[in-house]
Amino acid sequence: YDHIAALAYRWTQGEQFSAIVQDSPIDEGDLVFSFRRGIDLLRQVRNAVLQDDPSLSAKLKECIAKMDRDEVSIWL
C-alpha cells in the first residue's frame, strides 16, 4: 500500500494521471478505485470533525479537492 500512497501523493501534487499510470504496476481502474476510496475516507473524517475542529475540516476539504479531479472525479 505504500506504493499507492506514493502515487496518491504525486496525484495530489498535480501530476498527470497518464504519467502516474506509466510508473505503476497497478491497473488504471484499480488506481482510480483506490483514489476514490481515499476520497471517501477523507470525507468521512471531515464530516466526523466538522463541528469540533473546523480548521481540520477545512484542511481535509482541500485534500479532497486535490484528489477529486480529472480522471478520478465522478460527475453524476
Image: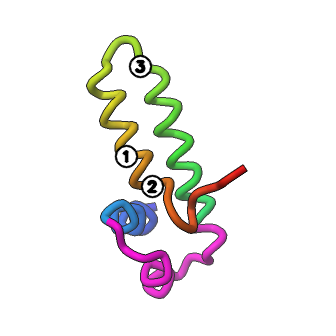
At numbered mark 1, what does the secondary structure look like: helix, strand or loop? helix
Span shown in magenta: 14-31
Evaluate if marks 2 and 1 touch, with contact meaning CB atoms under 8 Å apart.
Answer: yes
The single residue placed furthest to the left in the displayed view is: 55
At 58% from the left and 57% from the top, the residue drawn is 73
Position of residue 15 measured from the top left corner of the image (x, y, whole percent): 36, 73
The single residue placed furthest to the front in the displayed view is: 76
Q: Residues within 10 Å of mark 1 (few under 14, many from 20)?
A: some
In the image: residue 34, left or right of residue 17: right
At numbered mark 3, what does the secondary structure look like: helix, strand or loop? loop
The single residue placed furthest to the bottom in the displayed view is: 22
Identity of the amino acid at label 2? Met
Q: Which residue is mark 1?
A: 63
Evaluate if marks 3 and 2 touch, with contact meaning CB atoms under 8 Å apart.
Answer: no
**CA separation, marks 2 and 1?**
6 Å
Identity of the amino acid at label 3? Leu
Task: Compare marks 3 and 2 and give the one earlier in the sequence.
Answer: 3
The tag on residue 67 is 2
Number of marks in the image? 3
**CA separation, marks 1 and 3?**
15 Å
Q: Is residue 62 above or below residue 55?
A: below
In the image: residue 24, left or right of residue 40: left
Is 24 in the magenta? yes
Q: Which residue is mark 3?
A: 50
At 50% from the left and 54% from the top, the residue drawn is 68
